[in-house]
Amino acid sequence: MRNGKRLIAMAMVVVIGTMELPALHAGAENVAGIVEQTANDGKTVAQDLQQGWVLEDGYWYYYEDGQSVTGWKMVGPTYYYMYEDGRMAADTWIGEYYVNARGAWIEGKRPAKWMKDSNGWWYRNDNGSYPVSSWKQIDGAWYYFNAAGYRTTGWQYVSGAWYWLDTDGVMQTGWKYINGAWYYLKPWGGMATGWQQVGRAWYYLQSWGGMATGWQQIDGYWYYLNEGGDMAVGWKKLDDVWYYLNTAGRMVTGKASVNGAVYYFNSWGAMAEVDIVNIITNAIKPVGKTLYVWGGGWNAADNGSGETALYEGVWPQWEQYFQNNKNNYSYKPGQTAWQNGNREYRFWGLDCSGYLGWTVYNSVTVGKDGNGYVTASTGLAESLMSYGFGNATACTPNSRFYPGDIVSIKGHCFLCLGQCQDGSVLILHSTPNGGVQMSGTVNGRGSSQASRLAQEFMRQYYPEWWNCFGKEGRQSVSAVSYLNGTKFSWQKGGSVSDEESLQWMTADQVLEYIKANQ
C-alpha cells in the first residue's frame, strides 16, 4: 500500500470523538418549555422552547434550548453537520468527510481526487482504492492507468487498439497532429487505419495510423489524397497534368467517357491532350530538312539520291526519336561519311508513316506511354481511334478534308493542311523524291491551287531543298491516287482541342497561320 492511500479518520476522531453512530430517525423530537415574556402591549405570551430535530420548510434543523445548532453535532452515536443557517447537510462532502442522504457521517469514506507521488499521478477513489490496468472516466474525460496504478500519457496499446493520451493523460479523439503526422482517433479513442469516412470525405490512414497524402496505390488501384488528406474525386490537375478520379476515387486509365466527351488517359493516369495547332506546328518542323528513308532510315538505293543525304543532312533530334522507338520502327542507320570539312552525317530520315508517327507522338501532351504512335500507314488511324482521339471513315476526292486529317492509302499516308476553293487538298508527307515536303492534289494532269501554294511555300522557305528537289511538278500529286482511302479526323472535345479553329480554315488561311508562326 502506498503512503497516503490508507484512509485515516483520526482527525475526525479528535474533533468529534469515536462514538458509535446510529442513523437519523425520522421522528424528530420537539420538546416544549414555557418562557414568559412581555410584549409591547404589556401582555404576557408563551413561547415554546424547541429541542432536538425539527423539520422546517423541507429542511432538518437541530435545536438546543431553542437555538439551532451549527457545525458538527453528535446526536446519539452519529455525527451530523449543520450549515451556518442551521440546515442539516445531506449527501455531500464537508471538507474531507462525507455525510449520506440522511445526514450521517460515513466513517472511512473520503473524497475521490488526484494524488501525486514521486512516481507520478494516480487517482484515489472515495473508498481509498485506485484504478489499475483500466480506464476510468473522471470529470467527463477518460484516463488509462497502468498496472502500477499510475496515469499514462502518449501512445498506449490497450485491448488490441492504440490510443493517444495527452500530457495530462486525457484520451484524445478526432484529428490529432502528433510528431509530424495527422492521425484520426475514433469517437471511442482507438486509432483508425485504412479507409475512414469523416464527415462527407474519405481519408486513408496508413497501417501505422498516419494520414496519407498524394498518390497512393491501395489494393491495386491508384488514389490521390489531397493535401488535407481527403480523397480526390473527378478532375485533378497536378504539375500541369490532368487526371480523372472516378466516383470511388480510383484513377482512370485508357479511353474513358466523362460527361459525354471522350478522353484518353495513359498508363499512369495522365490525360492525353491533342491540339490541332500542335499537330500542324510539329508537322512543319521536318519539312525540307529530313529525307525519306524506307522503314524509317535512309535507303541509299532509292532514286539514286543517297549521295544527297550526305550534304543535306538530318536533324540531330531525330536520332533520339528513333532510339526511343526501336520496337515500333524498323529504321536502318547507315554508315557515316565526310563532307564539307569533317562534318558527320548519318543516313537517317523519316518514311511516310514514320513522319506522321513522329508528328503525332510529339503533339500529344503527356499521353505517350513510351511506345509512341509509330505504326504502319494502315494502322495509324486504328491506333488513334483506340485512344479515342477521333474516327476513321472511307474517303474519295469528293470528301471534305480538314486541317489535321490523316489519310491512309495503299503504301502511303499523309497529313492534310486543308482544302482550297477549287477542292484541291494541301498535304504534308514524306516521299522518296525529296523527303518531308508540302504537296497539293491535282485532278488529271492540270495544276491546282493547292499545288501552287505548295510550290511557292517550298521555294520561299526552303531554298536549299528547292534547288535540289524542286523540279516542276514535284509538288503535284494525283487526287485520284491520294484521296481514295481512309481518312482519320480528330474528334474535337474531350482530349482533342482546336483553340485556333484551324479545322475551319481553308488551305491558304492555314498557310498564313504557319507563316506567321514560323
Image (cartoon, rainbow, N blue to C red):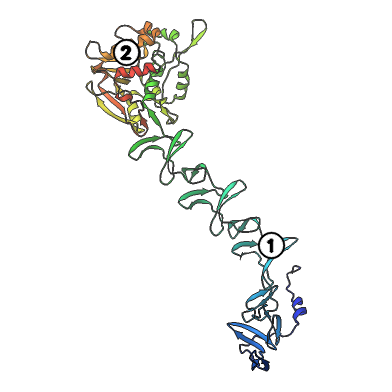
Q: Nearer the viewer, residue 303 or 290?
A: 290
* Residue occupied by mark 1: 150
Among the two numbered marks 1 and 2 on one chain, the one whose residue lies closer to the N terminus: 1
Q: Quadrant of the C terminus?
A: top left
User: CA gap, disc 1 to disc 2?
Assistant: 92 Å
Q: Residue at x 68, y 92 (%)?
A: 37
Residue 383 makes an appearance in the image? no
Q: Name the quadrant containing residue 282.
A: top left
* Position above or below: 497 against 452: below
Q: Name the quadrant containing residue 322.
A: top left
State the mark number for residue 322.
Answer: none
Q: Position of residue 455 (x, y in %)?
A: 32, 10
Mark 1: few/some/many CA within 10 Å (<14, 14-19, 20+): many
Q: Quadrant of the N terminus?
A: bottom right
Q: Secondary structure at mark 2?
A: helix
Q: Position of residue 222 (x, y in %)?
A: 47, 42
- Left or right: 152 as drawn, with respect to 464: right
State the mark number for residue 454.
Answer: 2
* Position above or below: 242 against 356: below
* Position above or below: 251 against 109: above
Q: Position of residue 273 (x, y in %)?
A: 40, 31
Q: Amino acid at mark 1?
A: Tyr
Q: Position of residue 225 (x, y in %)?
A: 49, 44
